[in-house]
Amino acid sequence: MVKRVTGDDVLAAAGSVRRVLEPAVERDWRVPIPGLEFTVASVVAHVCVTCLWYSVDMWSGSENGAYEVSAVDDASNERLLTSLLAGPHILSAGIEAAPPTLLGFHPFGSPDPDGFAAMACDELLVHGDDAARGLGVPFAPDDLLAASVLARLFPWHHVHAGEAAWDVLLWANGRIELPDRPPVGRWRWHCAPLREWDGAGP
């Protein structure tokens, strides 16, 4: 049985991204990421901001909060690395403090705390892979964490024999193609509580 996604998983995902990026901190992060409109720096900044957004949205109920959260333009690589852990720490603490019945705001639905944890992990892992591709370095996060995120956000997708959950998670996010699976165009999370899933695809 795949375990639920927690605040500790958010920290683990952030740590895995940091371990890949830290050795490349002296390199130019303004390089574009193949196939995307992001640079390495902008995708890292996006993930940092996303974790702060989720911290606010988790406690905002069904209404979007009146906040603007953004990263500093032209922040140094070192500052981006600092933020890469700071935002997830704030979100992780909020997830662990939240009652399991809490429902927050997201355009795809009203996530519970483990929904926010799974979304944050998906953002961190997938965009961490984007950044790694931009720098030309390998990124291979924990496959069990990838399986948990996949099961929570994409419950209609399953890992077939011979597949890695991490590859299927990348495919579900439209990042790669896999044999015997159709290309993914527009994708959607199920971030509301899993008990609300009707068993159908998006």
Image: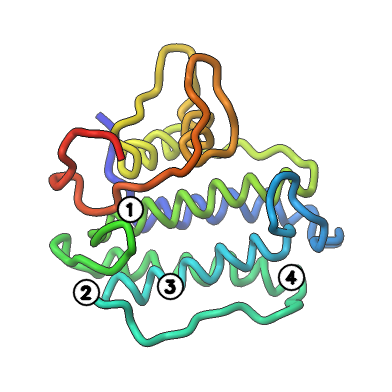
| Label 4: element kind | helix
Residue at image location 74% in from the left, 70% down from the top = 78
Locate residue 144, reporting x and y percent. 42, 33
Label 1 SS: loop
Instruction: Give, as a three-letter code, the residue at label 2.
Output: Gly
Residue farthest to the bottom, as pictured: 66
Mark nearer the N terminus (1 vs 4): 1
Provide the residue designation for mark 3.
Answer: 53
Mark 3 vs mark 4: which is more N-terminal?
3
Q: Please tell me how crowded label 1 is: few (under 14), some (14-19), or many (20+) other residues with Cα within 10 Å.
A: many
Q: Check disc 3 and give the amino acid type.
A: Trp
Give percent across and percent down for residue 53: 43, 72
Query: Closer to the camera: disc 2 or disc 4?
Result: 2
The mark nearer the N terminus, 2 or 4, is 2
Residue that carries the numbered disc 2 in the rendered image: 61
Mark 1 to mark 2: distance in Å?
A: 19 Å
Q: Quadrant of the C terminus?
A: top left
Looking at marks 2 and 3 on the same chain, the residue that comes earlier in the sequence is marked by 3
Tell me the residue that label 4 is attached to: 78
Q: 161 left or right of 33?
A: left
Q: Amino acid at mark 4?
A: Glu
